[in-house]
Image: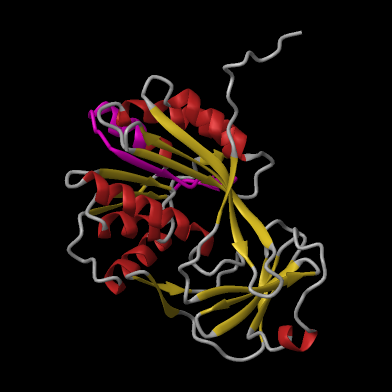
């Protein structure tokens, strides 16, 4: 039986949460749901991890402006609006301005827990100075892109949805970043990366937020466990020269953050750096419980 020697080290699991939100708050959770504030509006959304009882009385929950009613599908359902609310409204986070919009997938156009990544990415870009080029794959409505651009990076933002790219551009305008160096690309992530490798493109930072399952603009199929390994392999040539950072986040997959840790370790094994891994969590203001919402891993170049 093989046993690890005394020099073997194992990753520590970190729990990352955001303390800088003013326009978002996890008010309470329980009975398979969570009570959240997005600006001036209160929402109830499904949260299967909340197997405990709510800390706040039922009358507080009943004041929510809308509740998402889930169907038997993983993300399907509909909103039950108890009072009229706008189709979208502006929120702010540390100089970034963007729109919240209830969608049929229970989300509101951004993931509040990822603000801890926005802070970290901005810090790495600012510390590196000028000339940082960042690639954001599966970029959604662009808040990580805008955080990097606001810090001074040139960013290439790739998403398969024209609709979310359009929303990201709106967020760019709201954040007064019209003059920022951002390329907005509607494409399949793997196809785009392969083209970039053929033309010899180089990036210092890479942001990945791959879905569990998705489709590209031409019907290309994305499945997390099948497609992530070849994507990481194809990305290696793009970050070969003077890499700075890489961050990957995953939702709703049957894996721990160790999966991402060892995937990044294999990808970056020839380049000196450190990997951190763990969970993105949201903290309640009622009973101070923490809900794990995503897993992540980050690679940072040695000496940074």
Q: Residue 281 occupies which quadrant of the picture?
A: bottom right
Relative height, residue 87 to residue 279 (above, below): below
Horizontal side of 27 relative to 248 (left or right) equals right
Q: Residue 239 occupies which quadrant of the picture?
A: top left
Residue 69 in sight here: no
Residue drawn 36% across and 41% down? 206
Q: Residue furthest top?
A: 1
Horizontal side of 175 relative to 102 (left or right) equals left
Q: Magenta residues? A: 192-216
Q: Residue 213 occupies which quadrant of the picture?
A: top right
Q: Residue furthest front?
A: 6
Residues 192 and 144: in front is 144
Horizontal side of 225 relative to 139 (left or right) equals right
- Residue 209 lies, in percent from the top left, at 48, 47
Is residue 197 located in the magenta-colored stretch of the structure?
yes
Residues 156 and 271: in front is 271
Q: Quadrant of the C terminus?
A: top left
Is residue 263 located in the magenta-colored stretch of the structure?
no
- Residue 133 lies, in percent from the top left, at 24, 43
Relative height, residue 247 to residue 194 (above, below): below
- Residue 162 lies, in percent from the top left, at 39, 58
Horizontal side of 6 relative to 113 (left or right) equals right
Q: Colour scheme used in the picture? A: secondary structure
Residue drawn 45% across and 68% down? 20
Residue drawn 66% across and 60% down? 290
Q: Residue furthest bottom?
A: 83
Relative height, residue 70 to residue 142 (above, below): below
Residue drawn 62% across and 65% down? 283
Q: Quadrant of the N terminus?
A: top right
Relative height, residue 76 to residue 198 (above, below): below
């Amino acid at each position: 039986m093989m046993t690890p020697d005394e020099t073997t080290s194992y990753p520590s699991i970190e729990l990352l949460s955001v303390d800088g939100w003013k326009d978002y708050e996890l008010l309470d959770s329980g009975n398979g749901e969570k009570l959240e504030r997005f600006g001036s509006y209160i929402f109830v959304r499904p949260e299967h991890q909340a197997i405990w009882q709510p800390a706040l009385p039922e009358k507080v929950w009943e004041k929510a402006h809308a509740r998402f009613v889930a169907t038997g599908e993983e993300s399907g359902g509909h909103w039950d609006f108890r009072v009229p609310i706008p189709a979208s409204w502006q929120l702010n986070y540390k100089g970034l301005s963007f729109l919240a919009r209830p969608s049929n997938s229970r989300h509101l156009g951004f993931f509040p827990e990822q603000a801890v990544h926005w802070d970290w990415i901005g810090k790495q870009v600012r510390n590196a100075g000028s000339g940082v080029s960042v690639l954001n794959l599966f970029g959604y409505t662009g808040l990580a892109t805008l955080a990097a651009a606001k810090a001074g990076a040139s960013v290439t933002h790739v998403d398969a949805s024209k609709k979310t790219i359009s929303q990201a551009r709106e967020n760019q305008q709201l954040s007064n970043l019209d003059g920022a160096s951002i390329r907005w690309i509607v494409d399949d992530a793997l196809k785009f990366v392969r083209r970039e490798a053929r033309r010899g493109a180089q990036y210092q930072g890479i942001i990945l937020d791959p879905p569990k399952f998705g489709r590209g603009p031409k019907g290309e199929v994305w499945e997390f466990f099948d497609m992530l390994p070849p994507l990481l392999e194809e990305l290696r040539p793009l970050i070969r020269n003077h890499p700075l950072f890489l961050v990957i986040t995953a939702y709703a997959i049957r894996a721990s953050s160790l999966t991402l840790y060892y995937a990044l370790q294999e990808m970056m094994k020839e380049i000196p750096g450190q990997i951190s891994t763990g969970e993105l969590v949201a903290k309640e203001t009622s009973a101070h419980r923490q809900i794990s919402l995503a897993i992540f891993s980050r690679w940072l170049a040695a000496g940074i």
